[in-house]
Each structure stands twice: as C-alpha cells, then as structure tokens.
Amino acid sequence: MPIDISIEVTGIDFGDLRDRASSISMLVDDLSPISRELAEVVRDKHLNPLFLSEPSTLTGGMVYGGEYHAPLSPYTLRLHPQRANGQIHIDTGRLWKGAIQEGGAGNRYDVDGPEFTYELTDDRAPDLQEKFGRPILFWHEELLEEMGKAVLEYAIAVWEGKKNALR
C-alpha cells in the first residue's frame, strides 16, 4: 500500500504567493521531465537523512524533519530481542535499503501533468506511518525548499525556452 505525500498550509498570507504559484503552474503543466530529479530530492534530501537520524528502538525520539518516532513496543522487543540495541526503521535494514535504493523496489514515483506522487511500496510502511506513530513521508521546511528549487529551476528553463522560441 503506497503512502502519498500531501500538504496543508495554514496561517500564511497567500496573496503574492498565490500569484507566483499561478504563474509557475501556467509555465509548468507537466513535471515528467524532472520527475526523476524530484524523486532524487525525496530520496536524498528527505528519506536518507531521516533514516540516518533514527533514534534508539528503546527510547524513540525526534528525526530529521521534526517528527517524533515512538519507540518499539515492549511486545515487539520481547519477540525480537536483537532489535533492542538498534535504531528505529534501520535496525533490520529492509525498509531503509528499499526506500533509498535508486530505482529500488522500495519506492515508486509517478507524474500526472503537474502532480508528482512519491510512494513507499514496502507493505509495512503504512502501518509504521499511521498505526505506530513513526511517519516516514511528510513535508518539512527543508524538503519543501528543495522541491521548490527543483520546480522553480525547471519553470525558469521552460520560460527561457519559450522566450527564446519567440525571438
């Protein structure tokens, strides 16, 4: 089951921002030319740092991006005592390796016009994210900035291309 990234922003004056976003969306109606780059941003600028920042399976704690990851339950630790000295999400290596492999089976991305979707396809990911309180895919300032840079650079390239075509 895939996990989709979505965003809700509150408390911001969208006047000027909405105008800029509208201008960019008119230029960029298809993200497929940069879909691989966007996937690399998610993988390299979010997933890998997140996994590397995972806290102890015993204590839980904050991870890269500012989310809290709950510790493993006493039940899980009784069933798998070897996990007691590991880090959440990377102690077995399966989820981490699958999620950060380039073109790996642990992730998939898709573009439908201006919409980009990134999914973790590991069958455990939805439970880890929703049921056990350990978000894996989520928006945070650094990820928004990097994704925004990639789309803005592409929009500028599209604009330059259209401007040059008119000459």
Image (tube, grey):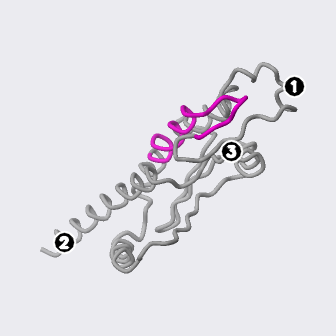
> Of tags 1 and 2, which is closer to the observer?
1
Query: Residue type at mark 3?
Result: Arg
User: What residue is disc 2 on?
Assistant: 163
Is residue 73 toward the left or the right of residue 107 in the image?
right
**Mark 3 Cα shell of 10 Å, populated few (<14), some (14-19), many (≥20):** many
Q: Which of marks 1 and 2 is nearer the N terminus?
A: 1
Q: Are marks 1 and 3 in contact (CB under 8 Å)?
A: no
**Mark 1 Cα shell of 10 Å, populated few (<14), some (14-19), many (≥20):** few
Specify the segment rendered in magenta. 41-62
The quarter of the image holding the C terminus is bottom left
Circle on res. 95: none
Q: Give the CA separation, mark 3 to mark 2.
A: 46 Å
**Mark 2 Cα shell of 10 Å, populated few (<14), some (14-19), many (≥20):** few
Examine the image and state in which quarter residue 77 appears: top right
Q: Are marks 3 and 2 in contact (CB under 8 Å)?
A: no
Along the viewing direction, whichever of 96 and 12 lies nearer the viewer: 12
Does 45 lie within the magenta span? Answer: yes
Tag count in the figure?
A: 3
Q: Are marks 1 and 2 in contact (CB under 8 Å)?
A: no
Residue at position x 43%, y 62% from top?
A: 31
Answer above or below: position of 112 versus 69. below
Residue at position x 68%, y 26% from top?
A: 91
Answer above or below: position of 80 versus 73. above
Looking at the picture, how far across and down is residue 24, in whole percent? Answer: 34, 71
Examine the image and state in which quarter residue 30 appears: bottom left
Along the viewing direction, whichever of 72 and 113 lies nearer the viewer: 72
User: What residue is disc 3 on?
Assistant: 134
User: What residue is disc 1 on?
Assistant: 78
Is residue 160 toward the left or the right of residue 21 in the image?
left
Q: Look at the numbered disc 3 and give the secondary structure of its residue.
A: loop
Query: Residue type at mark 1?
Result: Arg
Looking at the picture, how far across and down is residue 127, in whole percent? Answer: 76, 47
